[in-house]
Image (cartoon, rainbow, N blue to C red):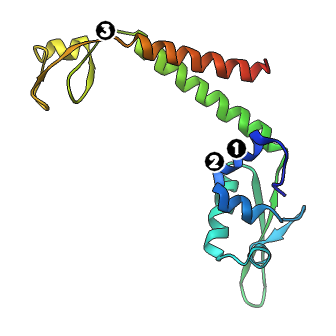
Amino acid sequence: MFETEDLLVREYFRKMIGEDGLKIMKDIPEGEITESEIVKLNDTKPSSIRKVLYKLYVSRNAEYRTERDDNSGWITYFWSFNSDNVKKMMDKEADDELHELRKKLEYERSGEFYQCHCQCVLFAVAAGQDFWCEDCESQFEHFDNGGLIKELEEQIEEREKARRGD
């Protein structure tokens, strides 16, 4: 099921369900499958299987339907996996990450920063404390965040290139 040559897809799933999750999902056939069938295929604890299935469900890469046994009342979950959603979810994750980087860049460009031994604050905060940090008992000194701004700009450019396919 999750055997793919696409390294980006593999890394996406590795981040989501881990290496153990990839091993669990490796031999899952197409179509519907029950949790107990997945357990038998992998000789793995049901709790490990449930954890992976839940992560896939939350990320909209898996879905399920249920059937109730009229005699026992037992509910069986039939799982299926939506490989069409993978690209869409990867794009959404990349967009969210790019948005967060842009917000960080905007914040870093927004003001003048000062730092002591334990924190970095905006000018207004440092001035309000007479440039003295009571937490670590040291002076706030000007902090040049130009290197951080440059790094954020490079990360944004790199991700934008990847989105365009450059």
Furthest toward the right, the residue is: 30
Q: Distance between the residues labelled 2 and 3?
A: 36 Å
Mark 2 residue type: Lys
What residue is pinned by disc 1?
12
Mark 1 residue type: Tyr
Q: Which image quarter: residue 80?
A: bottom right
Of the two numbered discs 2 and 3 on the same chain, state the one appearing first in sequence. Answer: 2
Q: Position of residue 23 (x, y in %)?
A: 73, 63
User: Which residue is rendered at x = 22% and y = 12% of the image?
Assistant: 124
Left or right placement of residue 165 versus residue 155 in this view: right
Mark 3 residue type: Glu
Left or right placement of residue 107 versus residue 162 in this view: left
Q: Which image quarter: residue 3?
A: bottom right
What residue is pinned by disc 3?
112
User: Label 2 neighbourhood size at 10 Å, few (<14), some (14-19), many (20+)?
Assistant: few
Residue contact between numbered discs 3 and 1, judged by CB atoms under 8 Å: no
Residue contact between numbered discs 2 and 1, judged by CB atoms under 8 Å: yes
Quarter containing the N terminus: bottom right
Of the two numbered discs 3 and 1 on the same chain, state the one appearing first in sequence. Answer: 1
What residue is pinned by disc 2?
15
User: Which residue is rendered at x = 66% and y = 57% of the image?
Assistant: 19
> Which element is circle 1 on?
helix
Relative height, residue 86 to residue 132 (above, below): below
Front-most of 132 and 34? 132
Q: Which image quarter: residue 64?
A: bottom right
User: Label 1 neighbourhood size at 10 Å, few (<14), some (14-19), many (20+)?
Assistant: some
Relative height, residue 49 to residue 118 (above, below): below
Mark count: 3
Q: Position of residue 81 (x, y in %)?
A: 81, 56
Q: How far apart are marks 2 and 1 (CA)?
A: 5 Å
